[in-house]
Amino acid sequence: MKTTMILAACLGAALLASATSVGYSAPRQDTTLQAKRQQGDRAAQIRAQIDKLRSELSAIQRQQAGQSLESEKSVKPGINKSWRSSNIEPLIKRLESESREIFAQSDLLAAVAGPLEGSVVADIGAGSGFMSQLFAKLVGDEGKVYAVDINAKMMKHLADAAKKKNVHNIQTVVCTDKSAMLPANSVDLVFICDTYHHFEYPRNTLASIYKAVRPGGQLVLVEFQRIPGVSRKWILGHVRAGEQVFTDEIVSAGFELINAHYLPQLKENYVLRFRKP
C-alpha cells in the first residue's frame, strides 16, 4: 500500500512537471532551434517517466487486487444453500409468481435495460429464464444471451424450455460462488436482477464480470431496497446491505455509475446503470 501511494505521488508530480514544462509554460524570448530541441527532449523524458510510473503502478495494483481476491471471505455464508436445491419446481414457482414485482414488470425491465439488436447480454442469476427469453427477442438472431446461474438443474430446465420454443440464441452457463464463468470481453450488457445480494464473494464475482464486459459495455442492477423501518422484515433479514454499499462495491470493481432509473411501477426495487470505461 505504501509503495502504491509513493508511486501515485511520483506520477502526480511527473504529470505536473509535464503540464508545467510543456503545456502551460509562458512564452519566452529565446526561440532558437536549440532551445526548441531541448524543450522537446525534456518533454519526451517526462512522458517516458510518466509511462514507466503508470506501468509500475498498474502492476502493483493488479498484484494487490489479486491478493485481495484470494483472501476474500464470504459476506453471507449459506446465502445460496436453498437455491442449489435439485428440486427446482418450488424455486420456479417462487420466481414466476404474479405477486413478485420483477416478474410482473419483466417487460418494463427488459425495455429499460435496452439491449441493442445484435448485442450480447449476460443475465446473471437467470433462474427460470423469463428475463433471458425477453432479452433473446430484443437482441435478435444476430445477438446472444448468456443465461448464468449457480443451479445446474435450473440451467438445464432453461435450455430445454428455450429449445421447445425454438429459441437458439440463449447459451446457459453454470457459474460458481466466485465467478460468472463468462469469456473475457464477450458481453455488451450485464443484467443482475434481485441477484446481487446472493453474491457470496462479491469482489471475486465482480472481477469476473468486469473481465467479461467489453470496454464501454454496461451493467444494469435491479435490487431490493433495504431501508430499516421501511422495507419488509424478510428483505431486512435476507439482503445484507443497502443501495449505497452495493453501489460502492460495483464502483470499486472498476465500473462507473451513469444513471439511476426511477420506475414508479417498482415499489421494492431500485434500478442503477453502470458502465465499464
Image (spheres, rainbow, N blue to C red):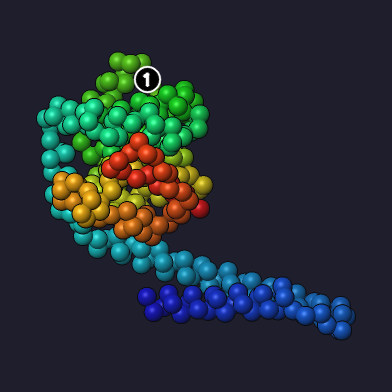
Q: State the residue in front, 58 or 158.
A: 158
Q: State the residue in front, 210 or 232.
A: 232
Extreme residue toward the bottom, this view = 29
Residue 18 on image: x %, y %? 66, 75
Q: Is residue 137 left or right of residue 175?
A: right
User: Quadrant of the rendered structure where residue 263 is?
Assistant: top left
Residue drawn at (51%, 53%), measured in percent from left and top? 277
Residue drawn at (25%, 53%), measured in percent from left and top? 227
Q: Judge whether residue 101 can be spotted in this image.
A: yes
Q: Is residue 235 left or right of residue 3?
A: left
Total numbered labels placed on residues in the image: 1
Is disc 1 placed on a helix, strand or loop?
loop
In the picture shown, does residue 3 fall above or below 99? below
Residue 88 on image: x %, y %? 15, 29
Label 1 belongs to which residue?
167
Q: Residues within 10 Å of mark 1 (few under 14, many from 20)?
A: some
In the picture shown, does residue 113 fall above or below 179? above
In the picture shown, does residue 203 fall above or below 219? below
Residue drawn at (74%, 79%), measured in percent from left and top? 25
Q: Judge whether residue 156 can be spotted in this image.
A: no
User: Quadrant of the rendered structure where residue 51 is?
Assistant: bottom right
Q: Is residue 130 left or right of residue 48?
A: left
Q: State the residue in front, 239 or 63.
A: 239
Residue drawn at (42%, 69%), measured in percent from left and top? 60
Q: Amino acid at mark 1?
A: Val
Residue 117 on image: x %, y %? 50, 29
Residue 164 on image: x %, y %? 30, 15
